[in-house]
Amino acid sequence: MQLLLKSPSSFKEIIRLPTSKSISNRVLVINALAQSTSLPACLSTCDDTRVMLEALMSDKRMVDIGAAGTAMRFLTAYYAVTPGEHVLTGTERMRHRPIRVLVDALRSIGADIHYVDQEGYPPLRIQGKPLVGSTIQLAGDVSSQYISALLLIAPMLPNGLTVCLEGEIISKPYIDLTLSLMRDFGAQVSWNRLLLFRC
């Protein structure tokens, strides 16, 4: 027996692809910093995005992000420029994931962040305030989430932010994604070889 299968000459259908967690989490932070009263549409339904959304909409001082690593990094920077005090914590495993690189970078531009327990690891006590610094130096091979967290808050700094990346940059596509989304929201950002800066 032979079966002859023929495809139609055309067809109409709507295909809904899963929404990107990476895009959703960045857009949520940008949206919150812009003090928007509406939520972005078509957000990811993954746990990281759900946790991020709940944290940004909550007025609680203690914020537990569970095992959401992206939320821990982005919210550390977000709370550093947001008025009020917050304690950012997570699961036992999260409390053993290093975050010193990001904390040191934020402190270098004036952030008020303290370790609640073990030095270099969550939980973090963050007192939000205006940040006065405008230049940060980082190794290019650090997590792109550290770099993106810093870039996302750049429009909140009165003199903008210059991030100098030294050495090989290993996560440029994710940095480019952050810059592209910031531009979509009206931020003036650009990439110049090993230098990221906002005018």
Image (cartoon, rainbow, N blue to C red):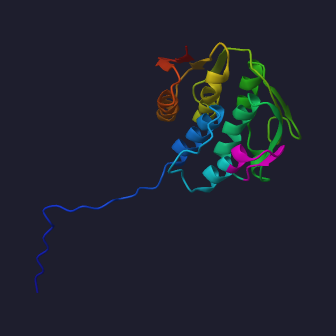
Residue 47 shown left or right of residue 196 in the figure: right
- Residue 177 at what x, y percent from top left? 48, 34
Q: Residue 166: x, y in percent?
A: 58, 19
Task: Classify residue 27 by image quadrant.
Answer: top right
Which quarter of the rendering shows the N terminus? bottom left
Number of numbered discs visible in the structure rendering: 0
Which residue is rendered at x = 73% and y = 25% of the image?
A: 106
Which quadrant would residue 47 be assigned to in this image?
A: bottom right
In the image shown, does 121 or 161 lie closer to the viewer? Answer: 161
Q: Is residue 170 visible to us here?
A: no
Instruction: Where is residue 110? Give x, y as percent.
Output: 78, 19
Start-end of magenta stretch: 54-66
In this rendering, position of residue 34 left or right of residue 117:
left
Residue at image coords 50%, 51% = 42
Residue 180 as seen in the image, left or right of residue 151? left
In reply to whether residue 1 is colored magenta, the answer given is no
From the viewer's perspective, tell me whether residue 178 is left or right of residue 111: left
Considering depth in this image, is 126 or 187 the residue closer to the camera?
187
Quadrant for the C terminus in the image: top right
